[in-house]
Amino acid sequence: MATTADFKNGLCIKHNNQLWKIESFQHVKPGKGPAFVRTKMRNLNTSRILENTFTAGFKIEIVRIENRNYQFLYKEGSSTFHFMNQKNYEQIAIDKSLINSPDYLKEGNNVDIMFHAEKEQPLSCTLPQNVNLKIVFTEPGERGNTATNAMKPATTETGAEVRVPLFINEGDVVKVDTTNGNYLERVKSN
């Protein structure tokens, strides 16, 4: 077993029978009383942030976590996504609830899947910061209307709804931020 002296950013621990990742920590030695460690931790199942204080020397259980690169293959039904390991071609199925932005996932995208190393259990699936998606439907924009930052709804090839500028047309490829679904830029075609 480890103690609070082993804390570092990114360390995964088991606390209250749940898995937590330490986002930040601070050792505090007050003038009066015992030392303690103030932490900010993220729950690996719910992504909830918890601020917790441990007394110095508190025993913790470290959990080994691995990030592996996978490629998205296909979606089965409405909630099962199939991925393939890039190194050994092993395939796994992951539930939609473990994926941070499933609406922006298209076949061939590379993702990072976080595994509990001892149990070989997937904990989360993270898409890249942004992805390129083709617009399959949008209303035609008004020509010359660029005085305002007007946006219109558009549907991407994955079925996700994105707000894009008026000059974007069907068939254009746009870069979309996967964390908030915002349009970033139009991708130039070669």
Image (cartoon, helix red, strand yellow):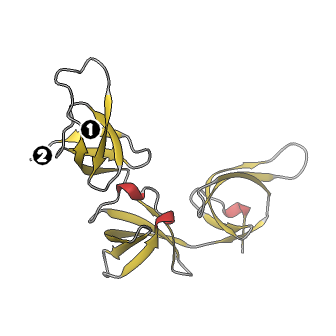
Residue density around tag 1, few if under 14, some if 14–19, many if 20 or more, within 10 Å? some
Residue 143 point in image, percent of width and height: 16, 24
Q: Which residue is found at the position 42% from the left and 76% from the top?
A: 93
Residue 114 point in image, percent of width and height: 48, 68
Q: Which residue is mark 2?
A: 189
Quadrant where the N terminus lies? bottom right
Q: Which residue is found at the position 32% from the left and 31% from the top?
A: 151
Q: Is residue 52 left or right of residue 42?
A: right
Q: Is residue 29 left or right of residue 102?
A: right
User: Where, by quadrant of the figure, is residue 80 drawn?
Assistant: bottom left
Above-or-below relation of 178 to 114: above
Kindly identify the amino acid type of the residue bearing the numbered disc 1. Answer: Glu
Q: CA distance from mark 2 to mark 1?
A: 12 Å
Q: Which residue is mark 1?
A: 185
The residue furthest left is: 190
Kindly identify the amino acid type of the residue bearing the numbered disc 2. Answer: Ser
Q: Secondary structure at mark 2?
A: loop
